[in-house]
Each structure stands twice: as C-alpha cells, then as structure tokens.
Image (cartoon, grey):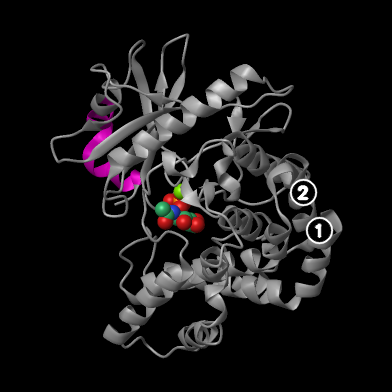
C-alpha cells in the first residue's frame, strides 16, 4: 500500500492522530502524501505553529528495514556528529541536516495499534527536490551536495553506525538472489524479458568488481549515504543551491563508490528512472562532468588513487545493479519495490539496463572525464 492508498483507507483523521504524537507545539492542519519513495510511506504534515510549519512523517517499511530502531540510532549519531562539526567549523553557505523529531514521550518513533513503525523528521523549509535533471544548472550542486555529505562524515569512524540493511549494494548477493528467484519462476518469454535475462547473464563475472576491490583492501570501508539519487538532494527555492541531503535510512558503513555510482546513474539520466520510454534513456557525459566537478570541489581531500581508478566501474555497476534489483523483483512478483502496475519493475529494469549500455558505450569518454579531474 502506498502513501496515497494509505490516506484513502485510513483517512486523514487517523494520520492526523499519528502526526499529533510528534507535535510539541501547534495543531496539525493537513497531512498529505509526499515524495516518490519506493519503500517507505511518506507524508508531509502542516502545522499552524509559527515556529515549525511542516514536518515529514514516515511509516517505515519493516519488511525491508527489519530493525527500524537501528535506523533511528544511526540517524541520531549521524546528525549529532554533523551538527557538532558545523558548530566548530561553520560553512560560508546554507547547509542543513534533517532533525529527528521526538514524540511527546521523548521517543524517536511511535508504534500504532497495528504495530506500524512511525517516525518524524524536520522538513527543510524553503527547499524543494527534483525527480529529473530538468535544469542542467543543478548538476554541479548535486555533486557538491554528495561531496559535502561525505566530507562531513569523513571523520566519523564507520563502526559507529550499525548495518541497517544487510547486503545493501553488495552486487554478488543481488546476483545470488536473482539466481534463486529465477530457479523458482518461469517468466513469460517476451522480448523485454529475454533482453534482461541476456543482459544480466553477459555481466555476471564483472559484477563482483567493487566487492573484490573491497576484499583486496583497494577500497576502504567508509560511511556512505546509500541512496543519493537526484530527489534526495534539497535545493533552496530562491538561490537554487543544494542545501541538504535527505533520506538517511541507509547511512551506514559501505563504499563511497556506491554513492558516486548512484548519484551519477541518477543525475546523468535526463529522462529519469521512471520513464516508460526506455528507448530515450542515455547517460549524459556533460552532466557527469558537472556533477563530478561539484563532488570533487569538496571531496578531493579524502580520495585516493584507487578511488579514482574504480569510479568508472562504480557508475556502470550501480546502474546495472539497480536494473538487476528491479528485474529480480519483477520475477519474484513485486515484493520489494512499490509498484503502480504489474510491469512497473520490468520497465524500471529496462531503463537501468539501457542506461548501463549507454555508460558502456561511452567508457573511454567517461574514464577521460575522471582522469582529467583528478
Ligand atoms: C529505493 O525508497 P527510495 O526511493 O528512497 C531503494 C534504493 C533505490 C531507489 C531507486 C532501501 O529508494 O536503493 O536506488 O529505490 N532503497 C532501498 O529509486 O532499497
Ligand atoms: Mg531511499
């Protein structure tokens, strides 16, 4: 059930009552479905308070995040760390970190009668997100936002945060899951399905590349965001500057390469990941250049020679991996990602595979962009 369906079946009354658990001042005046998340249900709550006018209310999908209290624990450690750092060394421009809002009983979540896990996060006022790169001038800002995010946690030891989602971005494990699903299903042999089957099969050996580099000690375990796609960056509505990175559920130990790959696979696909016209999907190298420039303007200090060496593979891999995850979920009967129609995950997989193809066909150019920017 998505947030809109939730609104329909539960009604605003019930949601208002849940939102009120988190309101320390003011009255809830409105609750509406918000954003386009594929996992959790998200609502924007409006208040009649003069202090805080909105906050974000979320029902965590506990089928995916089996230990939601660990997410809240990570979020509190992360926000605390960054707030302290910003206090010691203030930035010369606006940068905000979402705050965890507590309930009236000072808890960081609330469980409803059905056992659903609800939490509230501050809304970054005067800001907005984009679902696609509608205006190229945002590209550098998106890179800057990810760089700033990595920069601000680069001195927090990775082991301070818990693993909130085991196996997340471990491509060999997604391949294993895909094989298991495939062994139990006999998908309809349409041209699209056959294309996907072949696409995955041709890239199986290469798909271990980042995990191998990690195991060989070439890429260190660091803290990462986990999901820095375009619509998780907030822009100031007046200045159009990036002011925050939101969606902190997957902030945990990992490789910064997962983030670099995810940010680029998302930001350099001008038609967006939800397009039905997968024939129009391509990887825009100009956008890639801009995003990387923005990223490196704040991240250069902690990157090593090997980090640059694996950047191209990270871009190619994360697009491939997301396609694989969508395709496996389609084959499994759509049990992980929320869908709007039965073929939705197949369409999403095709978009990511087409994007991977476009990345592969421009390998030399992309490697050159990375090389020239070191
Ligand atoms: C999911 O729910 P959302 O939209 O924040 C997914 C990401 C994918 C993304 C693709 C926990 O994120 O890994 O990249 O969809 N999150 C999880 O849009 O699996
Ligand atoms: Mg997310």
Main SS of residues in magenta: helix
> Residue 312 appears at what percent x and percent y?
70, 66
**Toward the viewer: 158 or 30?**
158
Q: Earlier in the sequence, mark 2 or mark 1?
A: 2
Q: Is residue 152 above or below residue 28?
A: below
Q: Are marks 2 and 1 in contact (CB under 8 Å)?
A: yes
Mark in front: 2 vs 1: 1
Q: Is residue 149 above or below residue 221?
A: above
Q: Quadrant of residue 370?
A: bottom right
Residue that mark 2 sits on: 136
- Residue drawn 43% across and 43% down? 159
Question: In the figure, is residue 307 to the left or right of 105?
Answer: right
| Viewer can see residue 7 | no
- Label count reads 2
Q: Of helix, strand and loop, which one carries label 1?
A: helix
**Would you say residue 12 sits in the magenta stretch?**
yes
Residue 286 disc label: 1
Figure quadrant of the C terminus: bottom right
């Amino acid at each position: 059930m998505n947030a809109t369906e939730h609104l329909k079946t539960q009604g605003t009354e019930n949601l208002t009552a849940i939102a009120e658990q988190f309101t320390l001042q003011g009255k809830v005046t409105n609750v509406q479905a918000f954003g386009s998340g594929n996992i959790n249900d998200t609502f924007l709550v409006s208040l009649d308070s003069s202090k805080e006018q909105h906050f974000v209310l979320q029902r965590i999908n506990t089928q995916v995040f089996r230990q939601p209290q660990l997410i809240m624990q990570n979020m509190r450690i992360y926000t605390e760390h960054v707030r302290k750092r910003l206090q010691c060394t203030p930035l010369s421009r606006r940068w905000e970190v979402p705050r965890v809002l507590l309930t009236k009983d000072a808890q960081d979540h609330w469980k409803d009668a059905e056992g659903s896990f609800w939490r509230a996060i501050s809304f970054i006022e005067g800001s907005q997100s984009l679902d696609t790169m509608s205006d190229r001038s945002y590209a550098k800002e998106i890179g800057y936002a990810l760089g700033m995010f990595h920069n601000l946690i680069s001195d927090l030891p990775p082991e301070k945060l818990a693993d909130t989602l085991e196996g997340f971005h471990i491509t060999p494990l997604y391949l294993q899951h895909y094989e298991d699903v495939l062994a139990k299903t006999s998908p309809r042999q349409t041209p699209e399905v056959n294309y996907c089957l072949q696409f995955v099969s041709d890239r199986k050996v290469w798909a271990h590349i980042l995990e191998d580099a990690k195991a060989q000690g070439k890429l260190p375990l660091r803290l990462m965001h986990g999901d820095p796609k375009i619509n998780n960056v907030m822009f100031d509505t007046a200045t159009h500057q990036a002011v925050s990175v939101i969606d902190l559920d997957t902030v945990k130990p990992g490789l910064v390469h997962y983030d670099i790959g995810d940010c680029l696979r998302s930001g350099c696909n001008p038609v967006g990941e939800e397009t039905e016209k997968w024939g129009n999907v391509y990887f825009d190298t100009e956008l890639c250049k801009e995003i990387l420039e923005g990223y490196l303007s704040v991240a250069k200090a902690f990157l090593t020679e090997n980090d640059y060496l694996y950047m191209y593979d990270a871009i190619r891999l994360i697009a491939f991996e997301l396609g694989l995850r969508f395709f496996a979920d389609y084959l499994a009967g759509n049990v992980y990602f929320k869908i709007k129609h039965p073929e939705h995950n197949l369409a999403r997989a095709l978009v990511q595979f087409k994007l991977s193809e476009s990345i592969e066909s421009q390998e030399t150019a992309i490697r050159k962009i990375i090389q020239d920017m070191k």
